[in-house]
Image: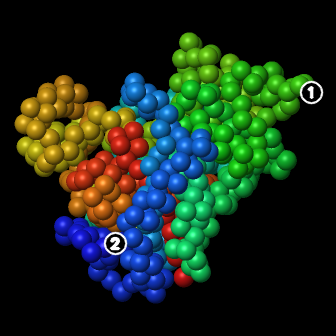
Amino acid sequence: MFVSYDTPDFYCELMNRRDAAPESLTLIRERLAHFGLTELRQRARVAEADLYNLGITFTVYTDRDAIDRILPVDLIPRVLTAAEWDHVERGVQQRVAAINHFLWDIYHERRILKDGIVPAGLVLGNSNYRPEMEGLDVPGGVYVHINGTDLVRDGAGNFLVLEDNARTPSGVSYVIENRHMMLRSMPDLAAGLDLMPVDEYGPRLRRALTETAPGGIRDAEVVLLSPGIYNSAYFEHVFLAREMGVPLVEGRDLMVENGRVFMRTVAGPRPVHSIYRRLNDDFLDPQVFNPDSMLGVPGLVDAYRRGNVTIANAIGTGVADDKAVYAYMPRIIRYYLGEEPILSNVETHICGEPEGLAYTLANLDRLVVKPVGESGGYGLIIGPHATQAELETFRASLLADPANYISQPVIDLSVCPTLCEAGVEARHVDLRPFAVTGESTWVLPGGLSRVALRKGSLVVNSSQGGGSKDTWVLAS
């Protein structure tokens, strides 16, 4: 399989790690080497049909030809050693702790703004800042119950944080389903290996939402609030409700009476204490945010402010995963925790600042430039891969609204062997570990590894043609 495999000087996590590979990793390489391409392709076709038949899909709204798609899964797993995972896990836990301190502070004393660590205008003028949250004491100080931290590895194999996802991070269902699919499709590859399991996520999440229920209610009623069947991640909503063993509801299934939230049932109203919401702030409560929203629950924010319900993630967390605030995360970690960041940021230039804008304009053809409020790979430009016309068009957009952009150097992203049309080839990958926070923070072993399926592409997002890999964490 690897006869013609070439990594073009990139750090390959499986084939040229540049360190001493543990025995388990060597065993995986040896087993993979005995597979023929014909057999691997046949197993891939069966796996793809399996995923489609199970309804494991997502929606691309801009594609008129195909509404529902499966997320392509590559059968060659991404493997992390126990030491690598320990580093990632501690770094993610540190980052989540700092984010929760930061959110508590900006909605209360605002010490970090008064001390000039983070510019006040960057926070208070942020479109995701919610004045409705000012002075609200969320249970346990937890604003971000579920966090997805996007990581990449550079040419030396170092993990770097690309961005934080502190609002409604998605993709965890694919982590769990990918593992189930791999054990069905490639049992001979995984046989005898001590892999860290991924099946605890649902119970862990429910426990966290119970631990942070108002008033410490231990038999809290937890629900998952979905926008409905037409949402792009509806499969995941169904999946997670089932994994947690909680009702899946839409806004019309909930009501607020006397400042308390109830769920409509055939047996009458039932109290609700914790809501895992999978819709944006703007649609949560038409009495407070978008008055035209048909997806939310009238009166929900009033119940929230009275301390009668927990909303996960909390309203207003979008400030923390803003790409401009991201540039200050190392300072935020030092300010609240008194620690050096375990996971480093990618060098970032804020175009809303004169120096950052000047540097970005002078080096546009060498940088990745992203809008601060977008996700899914939309609205960005990768300078070395853009045409001169594309660069000039983007330059005009940047000059028109510089505060909307940040820029970063192009990182030599690590690669993993991936089954492609021409055979097994190197493709760039990233990693999204998911952290669940209640009384403590637990990180799902591995996370979602996304892979750029197009040759040379650095964009791994599913909406932009990316796929995924099962992420194996070696337990020892």
Q: Residue at x 45, y 72 (%)?
A: 80
Q: Is residue 426 left or right of residue 252?
A: left
Q: Is residue 202 left or right of residue 189?
A: right
Circles 1 and 2, Cβ within 8 Å, touching? The answer is no
Q: Nearer the viewer, residue 189 or 45?
A: 45
**Residue lying at the far front of the rendered structure:** 38
Residue receiving disc 1:
267
Badge 2 marks a residue whose secondary structure is loop
Instruction: Find residue 395 and report its image quarter.
Output: top left
Q: Which label is found at residue 305?
A: none
Q: Is residue 443 left or right of residue 85?
A: right
From the top left corner, tell me how far across and down residue 363 is, in percent. Answer: 10, 46
Q: Is residue 386 left or right of residue 164?
A: left
| Crowd around label 1: few <14 · some 14–19 · many ≥20 (10 Å) | few
Q: Would you say residue 117 is visible in this rendering?
A: no
Instruction: Find residue 9 and report its image quarter.
Output: bottom left
Q: Residue at x 46, y 87 (%)?
A: 23
Q: Is residue 208 above or below residue 442?
A: above
From the top left corner, tell me how far across and down residue 74 is, in percent. Answer: 43, 58
Residue receiving disc 2:
1
The Cα–Cα distance between marks 1 and 2, rounded to whole angstroms, is: 60 Å
Badge 1 marks a residue whose secondary structure is loop
The answer to which of marks 1 and 2 sits earlier in the sequence is: 2
Q: Amino acid at mark 1?
A: Ala
From the top left corner, tell me how far across and down residue 136 is, in percent. Answer: 63, 36
Q: Nearer the viewer, residue 59 or 188?
A: 188
